[in-house]
Image (cartoon, rainbow, N blue to C red):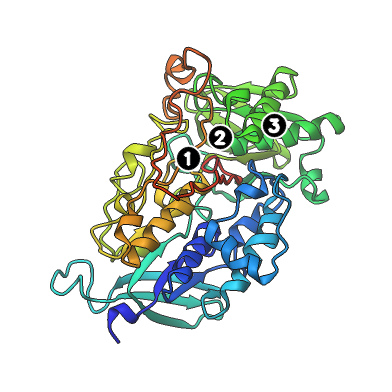
Amino acid sequence: MSNADLPVVVIGAGPVGLAAAAELHERGRHVLVFERGLVAGTAVAQWNHVRLFSRWGELIAPPARRLLEPLGWNVPTPDTYPTGKDWQQQYLAPLAAALGAHVLRTGVEVTGVSRRGRDRVVDAGREDAAFTVYLRHADGREERVFASAVIDASGTWGVPNPLGGDGLSALGETSAAAAGVVGYRVPDLDDPIVSARHSGRHTVIAGSGHSALTAIVALAALAEQAPGTRLTWVLRRGEIGATFGGGDTDQLPARGALGERARHAVQAGRLEVVTGFRTATVEPTAGGRVALVADSGARVEDVDAVVALTGFAPDLSWLDQVRLELDSTLQAPVRLAPMIDPNVHSCGTVYPHGVTELSHPEPGFYSAGMKSYGRAPTFLAMTGYEQVRSIAAELAGDHESARRVELVLPDTGVCGGAGVFDDPAADTASAPDGGGCCGAPAAVETPGQVVPELITLTAPGPRLS
């Protein structure tokens, strides 16, 4: 069998991975999708209670819609906002079923990728060798398959950033004493057990992204209903600055509204705000509580629960035999990194990108979705859908389409880079007219071309906006 007859392997059956499969299926390419979880969209299902910023009409990849509609799919009401549960059950699950078991294999973890018969050091014949993808099934059985190309859409959900201000776990953060206190997900307060854990107790929220804002809004509502509930919001940056977002100037109204609700909770005194706090130690105290101690020596005492929402990082451990070219700061592809660096960008300034920016020195290997953004926090699902459209076109030999610009991003209405938290003046900068700082780049359209809908994903974790 020649390499051309081998399947394209997609790693991860989340929104972007399934969109990649739909794109390849539509172009007649043999594709296999491997998902570590037992169902498609396993990661999405884990934040099932969180509502997305975008309406249903903006959350469906174009090839997925073309695949599903002829099958009698029950199209969700376009103008409503789904939760993670809705998105997984009403879209990702039907899409997985439409693709079929011959395409999607769940309960299968990819443990390594290499070139057949060659480790990363060997040059000879490398480009002509098939990819070898090593698999571990849920029952422990191991397998390997060969592929003509690999698209890594495995995301970053499984690797939350730690609470520690150095990017490493704070002293005591991983101890047994902290295990029942520190969590890394937006709490589901509809669950009575989770709600009881925070009611009448002291919860610290750490982080400055949209997930932190989501937690603030939810926990502030709980505090109104449950006497004695105390909330503290700790931020590493020196001022709140533009953390609440662009409000009415955000081109995604629900995203702007979230920031405004969090702002009102703070202004109403429902939580204490501590800025410039970089956690160095999680110190056990009496009664199963902990104290958070900052590098400066500042302390937050009598903490019953910590909700650490400080982003996510890519897991690269199983790609050590693949020749990757990653930015040293973001761990994103080097040609993409300057476009998404959070030290510079916080609004809709990411220019359209696809196969060119997502390629690596390993021909035929591509990063896509959240994985492609590495540690950058401003990923949009519409970006991922456009990424895999471009990659699929390239793999099908449609090079012109692969390089066509087909993306316009919604402006957040906020200026300044999220990474400049040490410089309050830069952090709070805004456009002279009070609108977005940069505006989205103009789309390049060809006759008859339809620019995709604005499709935006948000989930627990400030990486998704």
Local SS, label 2: loop
Local SS, label 3: strand
Nearer the observer, 257 or 280 = 257
Report which residue position mark 2 lands on.
209
Query: Which class describes the residues within 10 Å of circle 1: few (<14), some (14-19), or many (20+)?
Result: many
Instruction: Name the side, left or right, on which 142 lies relative to 37.
Output: left
- The percent position of residue 53, horizontal first and vertical second, equals 64, 41
- The percent position of residue 307, horizontal first and vertical second, equals 64, 40
Instruction: Name the side, left or right, on which 194 lies relative to 211.
Output: right
Labels in figure, total: 3
Task: Please name the amino acid that badge 1 sits on.
Answer: Pro
Q: Is residue 310 above or below residue 235?
A: below
Nearer the observer, 258 or 2 = 2
The answer to whether residue 299 shows anywhere in this view is yes
Residue drawn at (43%, 40%) of the image = 167
Mark 1 and 2 residues: CB-CB less than 8 Å, in contact? yes
- The percent position of residue 223, horizontal first and vertical second, equals 80, 31
The residues bearing labels 1 and 3 have C-alpha atoms spaced at a distance of 31 Å
Instruction: Name the N-terminal-most of marks 2 and 3.
Output: 2
- Which mark lies nearer to you, 1 or 3? 1
The residues bearing labels 2 and 3 have C-alpha atoms spaced at a distance of 25 Å
The label shown at residue 302 is 3
